[in-house]
Image (cartoon, helix red, strand yellow):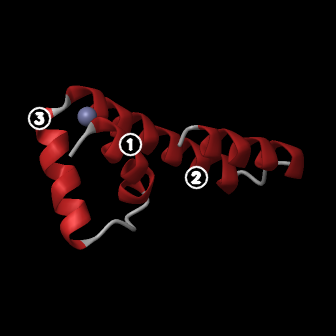
Amino acid sequence: MKCSEAARRIHDYVSGELEGDDRERLEKHLETCEDCRSCVEENMALRSRVRDLMRVSAPASLRAEVVRLSQAQV
Ligand SMILES: [Zn+2]
């Protein structure tokens, strides 16, 4: 798997939506690729930050901003 291919799947992987062969191939790539691994870590950190922000009832404008940022990441 190439990095460009892996990058497209990282979002699904982090949200637990990547399954089967795709998941296995991505995990294999992550074992050998430090760049993509750190990308996964960043995504996971972002996700937990978003969860924290959602817990404290954020104003709608901030929530929209968070959604925008998390989509820009992909
Ligand atoms: Zn890679």
Q: Residues within 10 Å of mark 3 (few under 14, many from 20)?
A: few
State the SS at label 2: helix
Q: Is mark 1 within 8 Å of ligand 1?
A: yes
Q: Residue at x 42, y 49 (%)?
A: 8
In the foreground, 5 or 19: 5
- The amino acid pointed to by label 2 is Arg
- Name the residue that disc number 3 marks: 32
Q: Quadrant of ligand 1?
A: top left
Cα gap from disc 1 to disc 2, whole angstroms: 22 Å
Amino acid type assigned to the residue bearing label 3 in the image: Thr
Give how far across and how far down residue 58 sits, in percent.
Answer: 79, 49
Residue at 25% in and 40% down: 2
The residue indicated by pointer 2 is 51
Whether disc 3's CB lies below 8 Å from ligand 1 is answered: yes
In which quarter of the view is residue 40 placed?
top left
Instruction: Please give the residue where the numbered disc 1 appears in the rendered image.
Output: 7
- Residue 25 x/y as whole percent: 17, 56
